[in-house]
Image (cartoon, rainbow, N blue to C red):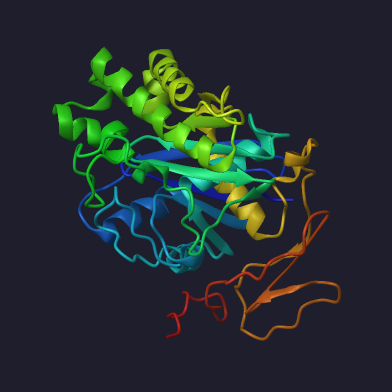
Amino acid sequence: MGPALAIDIGGTKMAAGLVAADGALLRRAETPTPDDGPESIFAALARVSDAVRRGDEVVCGVGTGGPMTTDGEEVSPLNIPAWRRFPLRRRLAESTGLATFVDNDAKALALGEGWVGAAVGVADFLAMVVSTGVGGGVVLGGRLLEGAGGNAGHIGHVIVVPGGRRCGCGAHGCLEAEASGSGIRRATGRPAVEASPEVVVHAGTVVGRAVASVANLLDLRLALVAGSVALGFGSPFFAAAQAELDRCARLDFSAGARIQPAGLGDRGPLVGAGAVGWRGLGVDVLAGAGGRPAAPPTLLACRTPRFPSGSAGQKGEREMGDGVWAAVVGRRRARPVTPPRPVVDGGAPGSPSG
């Protein structure tokens, strides 16, 4: 069975890779994120995605900054100002010819860590990305917390310094303004890689403060942190974060909560994006929350939409949308896929409806 095409979109760089059904990252490539317009960004994304493909991919999974509309149909990442209500899911489905699923990058990280990372066997945890921006994904009772519009977990906009730095969202003192790479650059005039020890400790402290609020609110005992800023700052950052978490999480159920580097390291964003794709095909990537590893799926049939709408599927296959048929067994019932518009005779993709 072929892998998932995994795509991670950040304000500084974009990456693509292939993620196997067992969570292994098979190959990867990355490119800087352009800042000269929405189409330039998408063109760079298409190029880096094409660079890793080998032709047998079965689904496309994407992790990107938010906020976004339901199912990632339109995205407006705060750290990519050129994309406002950008139709990412449709554009990628047309570009790749694959059923495409989009989610917040930190929620994707949570899926990856619960699938094959440090949270296997853990039913309740927080996963965070501290990079160009700050995001979070929450797993409760072995299920990813979605929220009314799919945007649950935006820990980057918890107020950690009342009256503090202005955030891109318009508020003051958000965690993202105080601890992200973009916030550090605005405050100091230097990139995070040149941060002073005081800046590192401040970033760790406010991250620990935000995690304590989540631990107290949701009865969590584990926070896993990834992202170039957090991992680049290393042990001084995590020591400051743990100290502040210990100071602020004092209730019987939250005292002793831990904050630590995500287990997947720099593989986390792409493995998480791959998990978004496999989950879209109906695979329960968080089955390990019950204490057992998730078994890989069995894909019985999958065809990309390179044939006219209305083609009949073979007996036993499950119709997933216009011309896309697939069946996944061994986990949950597959959820409907919204495929790209079919094409006729192998020509260029048709224009979207509407």
Q: Position of residue 312 (x, y in %)?
A: 75, 83
Q: Position of residue 13 (x, y in %)?
A: 35, 40
Q: Position of residue 322 (x, y in %)?
A: 62, 79
For the point 41% across and 55% down, the residue is 46
Does residue 143 sit above or below 233 in this rendering? below
Using residue 235 as the reference point, say whether residue 80 is left or right of it: left
For the point 60% across and 72% down, the residue is 305
Using residue 109 as the reference point, say whether residue 131 is left or right of it: left
- Residue 234 visible in the picture: yes
Q: Nearer the viewer, residue 265 or 317?
A: 265
| Residue extending furthest toward the right | 315
| Residue extending furthest toward the left | 189
Tag count: 0
Q: Nearer the viewer, residue 250 or 258?
A: 250
For the point 35% across and 57% down, the residue is 42
> Which quadrant of the figure has residue 279?
bottom right
Does residue 72 sit above or below 182 in this rendering? below
Q: Nearer the viewer, residue 182 or 35?
A: 182
Does residue 179 sit above or below 193 in this rendering? below
Q: Position of residue 210 (x, y in %)?
A: 41, 35
